[in-house]
Image (cartoon, helix red, strand yellow):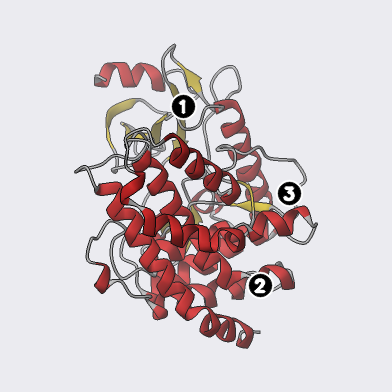
Amino acid sequence: MTTEELIEIVRHFCTEGTVMSVKPLGKGLINDSYIVRTKEDEKPNFVLQRINHQIFTDVEMLQHNIEVVTDHLRRKLQAENFTDIDRRVLHFVSTASGKTYHFDGQNYWRLSIYIANTLTVEEVTPQSSYDCGHAFGHFQQQLTDLNEPLGETIPDFHNMELRLTQLRQAVANDTVKRVKEVGQELELIEAHASEMCMAEQLHRQGLLPKRICHCDTKVNNMLFDRNGNVLCIIDLDTVMPAYIFSDYGDFLRTAANSQAEDSPDLNKITFRWEIFEAFTRGYLESTSSLLTPIEREHLPFAVALFPMMQAVRFLTDYLNGDTYYKIKYPEHNLVRTRNQLRFFQQVQANREKMAKFIALIS
């Protein structure tokens, strides 16, 4: 889109200041983002985002979730007498109709106030992992008394039973005649299928609650001030009811794997214990009064669940003809599958050690 078209979209929101420029911001994989700069020094700048409504099909629900969560966090900060609240929680700008999004006939847009003088971190280190565990655990803790229900912006996003059903359907259909290539992968998945559905089983028994989770725990989804202190959690699109396993296990799926998820060199895949230890310590410090014994006991299970779930998703896409994930070569999804299964095996080898470590943290 042209700058003029983007400025016209900004005009639908109740902003302060005169727009001087609109330029691309970051390299988001889902939403397109732009930095909107104003001429007046005393006026705020903004972040304009085009919402991917192919993924987030109910934008009204999406923005309702975000508004409820950010309002709740703002009230918490006010009660704790913070003076820099606008730097510690995202603030979305309304349109004249009172909504925090605008539909231009083709795309949905939202506008938030840009938080200046902040940093994001990309490198996964023990320190950034500790910060991530502590920040996202605190985020969950702050939302425990949220009374207004939230919807699932991506229904059944981390439902292992559904993912296995989708895989088995892909096997039955064998659309592109690849099932014969993946016998070992399917055998390994089915050998662990029952245990990997434990979360859904525990939930049906009333033993595992759903909580408000972020569901995209990455080190670059936190804003830091210039002194290295975490200011706030960002990228709230996937904030929704989920098992705490989502925030805990999915971070470690990528961060504790010594290799990228599409590395074909399986012999180099190891479990980064120092990342697990740092993230877990931070997470448990900030959720000590939140987690039930069942949740705490099954954290090592969560670490195993997410590489297995991702392997199932990659393999399903491979068998369906690569219709979901972008690929760079024909076997890309199969390589990803094997990578995640090897990491799953590395996790399995460390589960007893993880359980002992968790038991020692008060």
**Where is mark 3, residue-wise?**
146
* Neighbourhood count class around disc 2 (C-alpha, 10 Å): few under 14, some 14–19, many 20 upward: some
**Where is mark 1, residue-wise?**
53
Q: Which of marks 2 and 1 is in front?
A: 2
Q: Residue 354 carries which label?
A: none
Cα–Cα span, label 3 and label 2: 22 Å
Position above or below: 281 against 75:
below
- Residue 54: x, y in percent? 44, 27
- Residue 362: x, y in percent? 66, 84
Cα–Cα span, label 3 and label 1: 26 Å
Q: Nearer the viewer, mark 3 or mark 2?
A: 2
Q: Is residue 264 left or right of residue 261?
A: left
Q: Residue 9, located in which quarter of the rendered image?
A: top left
**Where is mark 2, residue-wise?**
296
Quadrant into which the N terminus falls: top left
Tag 1: amino acid? His
Give 97 or 295, whichever is nearer the viewer. Answer: 295
Tag 2: amino acid? Arg
| Cβ–Cβ under 8 Å for marks 3 and 2 | no
Compare marks 2 and 1 and give the one earlier in the sequence.
1
